[in-house]
Image (cartoon, rainbow, N blue to C red):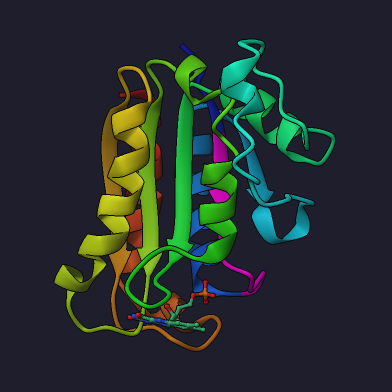
Amino acid sequence: MTKNVVVLMGSPRENGNTNILCDEFIKGAKTTGANVNKIIIQDQNINYCIGCSSCYKQGEKYCVIFDDDMRYILDEMDKADVIVFASPLYFYTITGQMKTLIDRMTPRYQDLHDKEVYFLSCGITGSQDNFNRAIEDFRGLLDCMPSPKEKGMVLATGVWEEGEINNTKFVQEAYELGKTVDD
Ligand SMILES: Cc1cc2nc3c(=O)[nH]c(=O)nc-3n(C[C@H](O)[C@H](O)[C@H](O)COP(=O)(O)O)c2cc1C
């Protein structure tokens, strides 16, 4: 079965290491014939969740600030079989861009059932243990979604400058992981 994949790129740096990881993952995914849509979160107009609870109270999944790009992003997530969350480490966790998007999933995260999910991250740290908080943030979201399947992650250590990741084993790792989307 041809998979539909949506990649959510959460670094503010379009030429950065996270985006390179995403592109390698996508190259791998495309070898399986997958349809891929990459969304660069920084380029989207996504307002903060204001905690008004309208999406709960009205029972209509109505969001009072839905007329920004989040409506499109949630539609894409809904259509996808596979969702890739990609974020560099910022103070041991995900970026504000990624967290803002996750908070805005509130009206519809319960509809996103049986999604296959990947996580891509990078940071200057030399230890993969230092990604644990970011992984837990990501798993907190998965705990709220119905029957997600976590399929894998790349945690790229030792990179800071834009493009530095190109000289590491992690690009190949991301490519190989992308090839698993049809497993
Ligand atoms: C605000 C900020 C906070 C950061 N915090 C961490 C951190 O806690 N741990 C870490 O290993 N790297 C940290 N870094 C380094 C980035 O994760 C690293 O530069 C990464 O390659 C950036 O990804 P990008 O190129 O996709 O933007 C931080 C960078 C910035 C700008």
- Estimate the x, y position of residue 167 in percent, counting from the top left: 40, 81
Q: Quadrant of ligand 1?
A: bottom left
Quadrant of res 11? bottom right
Q: Is residue 93 left or right of residue 33?
A: left
Q: Which residue is rendered at x = 47% and y = 55% of the image?
A: 86
- Estimate the x, y position of residue 136 in percent, counting from the top left: 25, 52
Q: Quadrant of the C terminus?
A: top left
Q: Is residue 7 magenta?
A: yes
Q: Which residues are magenta?
A: 6-15
User: Vertically, is 85 above or below 16?
Assistant: above
Q: Which residue is rendered at x = 59% and y = 41% of the image?
A: 51
Q: Nearer the viewer, residue 18 or 27?
A: 18
Count how many numbered circles sit on residues in the image.
0
Q: Which residue is rendered at x = 38% and y = 78% of the image?
A: 91
Can residue 83 be seen here? The reply is: yes
User: Vertically, is 145 above or below 1?
Assistant: below
Q: Which residue is rendered at x = 76% and y = 58% of the image?
A: 43
Q: Nearer the viewer, residue 133 or 32?
A: 133
Q: Is residue 124 magenta?
A: no
Single out the residue that lies furthest toward the right. 67
Q: Nearer the viewer, residue 52 or 90?
A: 52
Quadrant of res 73? top right
Q: Is residue 21 left or right of residue 49?
A: left
Can residue 171 be seen here? The reply is: no
Single out the residue that lies furthest toward the bottom. 161
Q: Nearer the viewer, residue 161 or 74?
A: 74
User: Vertically, is 145 above or below 37?
Assistant: above
- Estimate the x, y position of residue 143 in percent, counting from the top left: 28, 32
Helix, strand or loop: magenta stretch? loop
